[in-house]
Image (cartoon, rainbow, N blue to C red):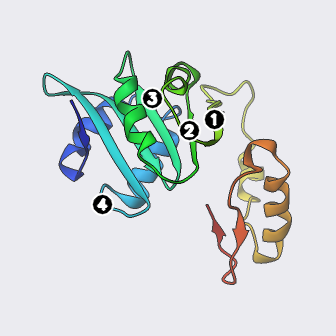
Amino acid sequence: MIRKLNKDDHESVMKLIGPKPAENLFIIGDIEAYGYDSDIQDLWGQFERGKLMAVLLRYDRNYIPFSEGQYDVKGFADIINLNPSRIEISGLKHLIEPLQQYIHRDVRKHSETYYAKCIGLSYEVDKEKIKLASYLQSSEYHENVEMLRSIPEFATGNLVLKRENVLKR
């Protein structure tokens, strides 16, 4: 059974996605930022015998599935196909590949998610150099936004400088 998730499901969601925070960075971050009741995003969960087995996040027009094992690919595809806008699908390759055969609409971009995870350093950290690090200054925003736009994976993103000099996702 697939149903929309709400704040009462948070513990189950975190139990499923929490053990793999690098793989679920966007799902976790969007839940923290927008919760379960927002116009910008929706979350669905697949349950079997009352246990959450898979989640599907919609952030704007981007869909991200996650499961530790097999999931209801057709059920998630049916939800995605209801969106009238051009969509994007991103996530781990073994989770998004099966979806593609069931998506019967215009997909702006399929993005396989790659991630890097530091599990240890091979050198000692110079604590004095760390003290020299500073926050990005507003005069440096434009240069950094241009650098991000030059990265192919971010080329379709909506990186803009607002008048308040805030970087928008």
Residue 134 screen position, x and y as percent: 73, 64
Residue at the disc numbered 1? 110
Amino acid type shown at disc 1: His
Residue 94 appears anywhere in the view: yes
Residue at the disc numbered 4? 37
> Image point 58% across, 22% down: which residue?
93
User: Upstream in the sequence, badge 2 or badge 3?
Assistant: 3
> Image point 58% across, 50% down: which residue?
86
Amino acid type shown at disc 4: Asp
- Front-most of 73 and 132? 73
Residue 158, picture quadrant = bottom right
Q: Is residue 39 above or below residue 87?
A: below
Labels 3 and 4 touching (C-beta < 8 A): no
* Mark 3 burial class by Cα count in 10 Å: few <14, some 14-19, many 20+: few
Label 2 or label 3, whichever lies nearer to me, is 2
Amino acid type shown at disc 3: Lys
The tag on residue 89 is 2
Residue at the disc numbered 3? 20
What SS does tag 1 mark? strand
Labels 2 and 1 touching (C-beta < 8 A): yes
Residue 144, picture quadrant = bottom right
